[in-house]
Image: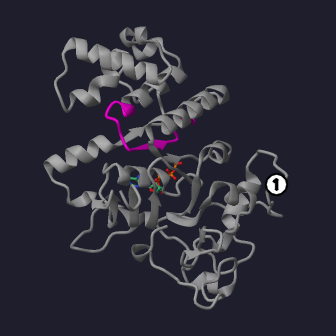
Amino acid sequence: MSGPLLKVENLTKHYPLGTGFLKKSVPVIRAVEEVSFSVEAGETLCIVGESGCGKSTVARLLMRLVEPTGGRVLLDGTDIAGLKKEALHAWRRRIQMVFQDPYSSLNPRLTAGRIITEPVENFERLSRKQRQALAADLLRKVGMSPEMMHRLPSDLSGGQRQRLGIARALSLNPSLIIADEAVSALDVSVQAQILNLLRDLQQQMGIAFVFISHDLGVVEHFAHRVAVMYLGRIVELAPCEALFTKPVHPYTEALIGAAPVPDPRRVRLEAPVEGEVPSPINPPSGCAFHPRCPLALERCRIEVPPLVPMPDGRVVACHVRAPATDIPGRPVLAGDRWSL
Ligand SMILES: Nc1ncnc2c1ncn2[C@@H]1O[C@H](COP(=O)(O)OP(=O)(O)OP(=O)(O)O)[C@@H](O)[C@H]1O
């Protein structure tokens, strides 16, 4: 198969604030603005950023839990918006989600076996024997004993419940798993076990991950590439090692500088990011980061910086660090014409 597994083009989501009276336009929350990226089969793309920057909305858009205001999501080159009944069913099998909270995302009344086989049973009837065989297989895959299939979620630890969430996501043999803060609610040692499990499963089954996290320590050890979001937009997308050792966007630099993990390889910003994230209802003009940016120029107040490709393969949206006009012949490409 040529081309990326997942391609996201100019994805935009505005949530209206109330309803318009007499066709008056209503203010909107600009949760996601023209986000473009791609994910290869078997790759892990992490999306990071402060609370409210639009990470979970991207996840919901990928899962079709909310409809986009604009833009497209393509799986193996097919736009998911145009899918009808059977094709939609087939697509639903291929993208699965693991949620943040293993305590509330599992039905407390169902046994572990029922929970993890339920997605398959939404598509086909299973005999008791088939269900038990499938449950045992899935439990083994996530490092649990098949005997656990008879337990209720309340009998299990947080790490075991998250393993169930992963087993459930695996049940349909997906190509892509969207994990939204999937280890945030767990203790650090359990986090490490779950991340190792996900990495092993990726190697064995070739699954791709879109992994959403606000925890840079987790991202650094798990991502192949990292997309940094600020106020609904991607400001930098880079290979993981390059991003952490040599952040280019001043916001990425500030995030890494503020992370509580001492690492002498990291470039540190003199001053941490000052001020609050602005409101997505009335975002600043030009580069949305300019009011907090120590490097901001007049141009940053006026023009939204385009994402510009750098020689090392990353893309950065910054008039100062990645000026689009600096390098003669360097293309400035709109998201819909360019595979990130
Ligand atoms: N259903 C909704 N209706 C209205 N506004 C929403 C809705 N969902 C999200 N938002 C708003 O969209 C913006 C982005 O929210 P989102 O949850 O995607 O951010 P996030 O980066 O995942 O944050 P967090 O890490 O806190 O979950 C926020 O301003 C949020 O309040």
Question: Looking at the picture, does residue 131 appear above or below residue 307?
Answer: above
The x and y percentages for residue 319 are 64, 81
**Residue toward you, 11 or 90:** 90
Magenta region, residue range = 169-184
Residue occupying the point 73% across, 49% down: 259
Q: Where is residue 302 in the image (x, y as percent from the top left)?
A: 57, 85
Is residue 183 one of those drawn in magenta? yes
Q: In this view, does 157 lie above or below 227?
A: above
Q: Position of residue 7 (x, y in %)?
A: 39, 61
The reply to whether the magenta stretch includes residue 222 is: no
- Is residue 286 toward the left or the right of residue 262 in the image? left
Q: What residue type is labelled 1?
A: Arg
Residue at image position (60%, 68%) is: 313
Outermost residue, front side: 1
Q: Mark 1 points at which residue?
A: 265
Specify the quadrant that holds the N terminus. Answer: bottom left
Q: In which quarter of the image is residue 136?
A: top left
